[in-house]
Amino acid sequence: MTKILIIDDDKDLQALYREILEQHDFKVVSALGPDEGIDLVASEKPDLVVLDIMMPDGFEGFEVARAIREDLKLMELPIIVMSAVHEVKKIPYRFTPDEKHLPVDLWLDKPFSPDDLVTRIRTALNETPGQPG
């Protein structure tokens, strides 16, 4: 069974993502913050990470992505960012995956549909639609 780690400081969103992903036969592990998330990447060895950018101390998701790539040396671990930063902060530019500054595989703007989340996860895992997690 494919294991997904969700790193998001919002408990309600974590519960929603868990419900969606478990309906598609994914095993879900979650972390409420950056440090716990990095620890769980190391200990749980997930197949993919779904990562929020804006957490209590700012844009901590950027640091988590870099820690996964640089400190843990997990260059092949798929990371999907999900964030409302473009909507909430009204930034005049767009963040996109970037090997040096934002080393992630996909960016998903909140809000998004459950189907879009599952499709992006399957794409990042190179799975076909309808394939169990």
Image: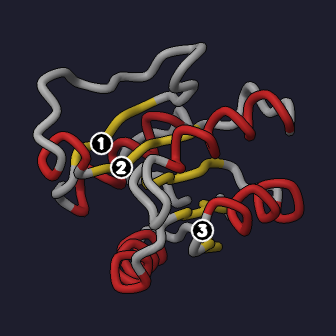
Comes first in the chain, label 2 or label 3: 3
Marks 1/3: CA–CA distance: 19 Å
Q: Amino acid at mark 2?
A: Met
Marks 1/2: CA–CA distance: 5 Å
Q: Amino acid at mark 1?
A: Leu
Image x and y of residue 112, in percent: 18, 55
Image x and y of residue 18, in percent: 46, 77
Residue identifier under label 2: 82
Tags 1 and 2 in contact by the CB under 8 Å rule? yes
Residue most extreme to the front: 57
Between 91 and 21, the residue placed more toward the observer is 91
Q: Secondary structure at mark 1?
A: strand
2 vs 3, front mark: 3
Query: Which residue is depicted at the point 45% across and 67% down?
Result: 56
1 vs 3, front mark: 3
Residue identifier under label 1: 108
